[in-house]
Image (cartoon, coloured by chain):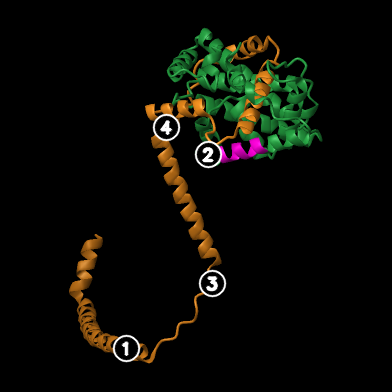
Chain colours: A orange, B green
Amino acid sequence: MTNRDQHESHELRLTGHPELSAADRAVESALDQLAHAERHAASPALEARVMASTQALLSRGPAPVVSIPNRSFARGFRVAAAIGVMACAGAAWLAIRPAAPAESFPTAAVSTLAEDIDALITATSFADAGFTAELDKLDADTLNFGQSSTGQDWLDAIEETSL
Amino acid sequence: MTRLASRDHREPDAGKRLADLLARASAGDNDAWRSIIDLYARRVFALARSRCGDPDLAEEITQSVFATVAGTLGSGGYTEQGKFEPWLFRITMNRVRDEARRARRAGLSLENAGALPCAAAASPGLSPSILSRLRQGLAELSDADREIIELRHHAGLSFKELTDILNEPLGTLLARHHRALKKLRNFLDAAGINSPDHDDQDQNDHAEAKP
């Protein structure tokens, strides 16, 4: 409370309500006397009983310190929980999402696709031509090897090896 | 000691002395805690008794309020900012409201102030019949009007402290207090009791400071 507040408070205590008539001030005074009577209606041992019932509470000392969980553990737990929530949400979304609508290709897309297929066929044709030539060459080599292996020299070589 | 707690005669350094008491009590000083109880126990009791009527219940409420305060002080949970009294009486009002709710659930009523015996609560200036009428008049007030009267007179709070408890502007509280006083005056007039003697006003104003 500042000095100004204290001064104002003290001023109010001294002056009371500034606009009261004499009759109202008399009622106010009667209320003060009623309050006085109420205070003295208490048992003379009121203060002693209050003291006896509260003294232990006052000397109990500060409240026990509440342990605070490890911050890094808490942070890791929060991250794991967030990931788990996101995973659950994703799985739920995949489970309940509506079937994808049938795709319809626009005309321009269809024409582009046809051109791609033609290009692929052309490339395959070039590849086939090269492959055919290779096959022909391999076939000729095989024939020559067969003819050469039917000679006596070949049989002699086999016999020497077996011995 | 009584002068420190009095609404109209508080000393300028009362706040500093109270802060010192609170600091010592928080550190476990039983003498300081006893001084705080001496200062405020009867004001808390008067507020509770005015609202609930039953002196035994008012004493239970008083003990409960101070148990809360002691627990908070002892645990270091209170920071002195010059608002101990608003805090203390806010706790009291909350306890009173709790008891009122409990009584309503049990089918009882705490609004029986008019039937209170007041022989043991002698007042230095007014007759017991006028005090009884005043209690009846309080019971006739709306809850908001009664609250401000009881906090002002029974708890002994200044209007500035009332603004802290009730969270309303000072002008609004002054107007409500004025209106409540008028209603009480009209009630006393209708009951055939003239307003208390104006000539004794100065004496009555200082009645709180008397032991």
Q: Are marks 2 and 4 in contact (CB under 8 Å)?
A: no
Q: Is residue B50 above or below residue B70?
A: below
Say which residue appears at 63% left-offset and 21% top-offset: B200
- In the rendered image, residue B104, in percent from the top left (x then y), is placed at 77, 36
Q: Earlier in the sequence, mark 4 or mark 3?
A: 4
The chain letter for the residue carrying disc 2 is B
The residue beneath circle 4 is: A70
Provide the major secondary structure of the magenta segment.
Answer: helix
Q: Are marks 4 and 1 in contact (CB under 8 Å)?
A: no
The chain letter for the residue carrying disc 1 is A
Type of amino acid at the residue the image marks with label 2: Asn
Type of amino acid at the residue the image marks with label 1: Thr
Say which residue appears at 69% left-offset and 35% top-offset: B185
The chain letter for the residue carrying disc 3 is A
Q: CA distance from mark 2 to mark 4?
A: 41 Å
Q: Is residue A6 above or below residue B35?
A: below
Q: Pick the residue in front: B86 or A65.
A: B86
**Quarter of the image where one finds residue B175:** top right
Q: CA distance from mark 3 to mark 2?
A: 57 Å
Q: Is residue A25 left or right of residue A72?
A: right
Q: Secondary structure at mark 4?
A: loop
Query: In this view, which residue lies farthest toward the top?
Result: B31
Say which residue appears at 66% left-offset and 35% top-offset: B146
The residue beneath circle 1 is: A112
The residue beneath circle 3 is: A98
Q: Earlier in the sequence, mark 4 or mark 1?
A: 4
Type of amino acid at the residue the image marks with label 4: Asn
Q: Pick the residue in front: A23 or B55.
A: A23
Q: Quadrant of the N terminus of chain A?
A: top left
The residue beneath circle 2 is: B167
